[in-house]
Amino acid sequence: MKLRNKFEKQVSKQLKRSKVAFTYETEKLTYTLVSSYVPDFIVSLSLDKKIFIECKGYLRPEDKRKLVAVKKQHPLIDLRILFYPFKSQKREIQYTKWAIKNKIPYAIGKIPKEWFEIDDLT
């Protein structure tokens, strides 16, 4: 059994000396954090159709988790990302691949006119 640090090794030794049955990192428990999300812009296209636009320059890991959680828990909303123009092609590829993978429509720099057309809503 490979332990992560000295403290866990110490605890493992104590458990062995105590002759109790134990396992190490063998079960995974899911949990949900309760939080709230405030989109940057909400565009109302009609009484029952709106898009939520999140503006991002730097897409931090916590932003990614938050946006994926919002989409998962609110599957009917139309959430889109508007990325600040990229200075790095590597970052552009990374962010756009992430958006595609997570089925979040995106644009770079400016909101496309198509986003304002009701027929375009996905």
Image (cartoon, grey):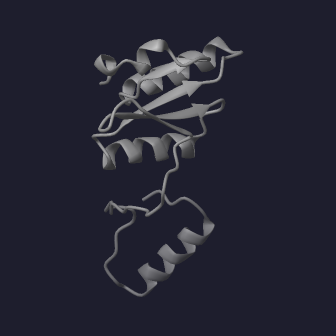
The picture places residue 91, in percent across and down from the top left corner, at 62, 20
Q: How many marks?
A: 0
Which residue shows up at 41% across the image and 24% down it?
105
Does residue 11 appear left or right of residue 74 in this picture? right
Query: Residue at image x 48%, y 47%?
Result: 66
Q: Name the residue rendered at 35%, 27% in the picture.
A: 103
User: From the viewer's perspective, is residue 81 above or below residue 72?
Assistant: above
Tell me if 9 is positioned left or right of 74 in this view.
right
Q: Is residue 41 above or below residue 107?
A: below
| Residue situated in front as seen by the camera: 76 or 13 | 76
Q: Residue furthest front?
A: 47
Instruction: Return the residue nearer the eye: 74 or 91.
Output: 74
Q: Horizontal and vertical percent for residue 88?
A: 68, 15
Image quadrant where one finds the N terminus? bottom left
**Residue that protrudes farthest toward the bottom in the picture:** 18
| Horizontal and vertical percent position of residue 5 | 59, 62
Q: Residue furthest right?
A: 87
Between 40 and 75, the one nearer to me in the picture? 40
Residue at 51 percent across and 18 percent down: it is 107
> Which quarter of the picture shows residue 83?
top right
Q: In the picture provided, is 110 more to the left or to the right than 48?
A: right
Closest to the observer, 21 or 91: 91
Q: Is residue 23 above or below residue 70?
A: below
Q: Quadrant of the C terminus?
A: top left
Vertical relation: 66 (above or below) 51:
below
Q: Position of residue 90 (x, y in %)?
A: 62, 15
